[in-house]
């Protein structure tokens, strides 16, 4: 077999078929969610919810606690973001694309550090041996947590954090044998770059008016 195909498929040879199907569904809805986010379309949230709820279950089965916590948080934040993005006043959306101010940047730093601390604590309390990949997981959890909050409030900096965390996640999931997820995060990286450019154009246009 081709080494590339073998790399992506070999981890699934002994995997339960229903988990493979669930991962494939999460893959499709996850990609759709990022595409909608790039377009500033509120469908980012219902599609994202499908992906994150499924992923919570999958990660629970593999005891990837940091990843599981993040996707549980994504699910909760998707509900908040769905509500926040849909708010209108005089037929105009209340929340518009903007940049973070100094206060919001510090809140983001605090959320990132707090998330890393909580994730580390969950690993420790559960008795899970913490290896190098888990420390990377803890770090990306902080980035993803903050990125999701920034996205829910339509801050353009969410894309910067997504890009950094996605790039880190590609080799992380490949190392863990999650071929589809590694491919998904590679696609996420390119979509996040496009998303940043699209939101920046929108921001520049609104500033010019």
Image: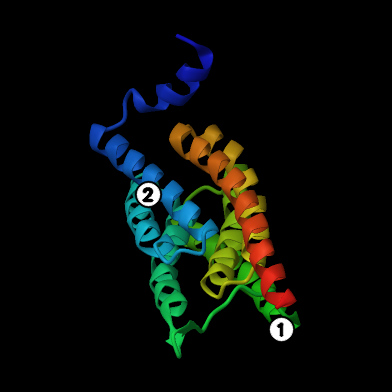
- Residue in the foreground of this view, choosing between 113 and 30: 30
x and y, in percent, of residue 54 in the image: 32, 52
Quarter of the rendering occupied by the N terminus? top left
Residue 131 in sight from this viewpoint: no
- Please say if 30 is above or below 79: above
Residue 42 in sight from this viewpoint: yes
**Direction top: furthest residue:** 1
Residue at image x 35%, y 41%?
23
Residue denoted by label 1: 103
- Please say if 6 is above or below 204: above
x and y, in percent, of residue 74 in the image: 44, 63
x and y, in percent, of residue 165 in the image: 62, 52
Residue at image x 62%, y 71%?
155
Q: Are marks 2 and 1 in contact (CB under 8 Å)?
A: no
> Which circle, 2 or 1, is nearer the viewer?
2
Location of residue 10 by image quarter: top left
How many C-alpha atoms fall within 10 Å of the one at disc 2: few (<14), some, or many (≥20)? many
Residue at image x 40%, y 78%?
83
Residue denoted by label 2: 29
């Amino acid at each position: 077999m081709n080494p590339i195909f073998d790399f992506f498929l070999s981890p699934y040879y002994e995997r339960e078929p229903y988990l493979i199907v669930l991962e494939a569904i999460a893959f499709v809805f996850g990609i759709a969610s990022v595409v909608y986010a790039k377009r500033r379309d509120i469908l980012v949230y219902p599609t994202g919810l499908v992906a994150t709820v499924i992923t919570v279950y999958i990660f629970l089965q593999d005891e990837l606690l940091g990843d599981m916590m993040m996707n549980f948080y994504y699910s909760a934040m998707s509900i908040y973001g769905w509500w926040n993005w849909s708010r209108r006043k005089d037929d105009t959306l209340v929340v518009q694309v903007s940049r973070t101010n100094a206060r919001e940047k510090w809140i983001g730093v605090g959320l990132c550090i707090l998330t890393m601390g909580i994730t580390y604590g969950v690993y420790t309390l559960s008795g899970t041996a913490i290896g190098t990949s888990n420390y990377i997981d803890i770090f990306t959890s902080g980035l993803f947590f903050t990125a999701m909050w920034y996205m829910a409030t339509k801050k353009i900096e969410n894309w910067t954090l997504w890009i950094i965390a996605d790039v880190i996640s590609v080799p992380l999931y490949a190392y863990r044998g999650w071929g589809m997820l590694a491919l998904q995060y590679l696609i996420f990286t390119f979509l996040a770059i496009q998303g940043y450019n699209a939101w920046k154009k929108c921001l520049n246009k609104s500033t010019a008016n």
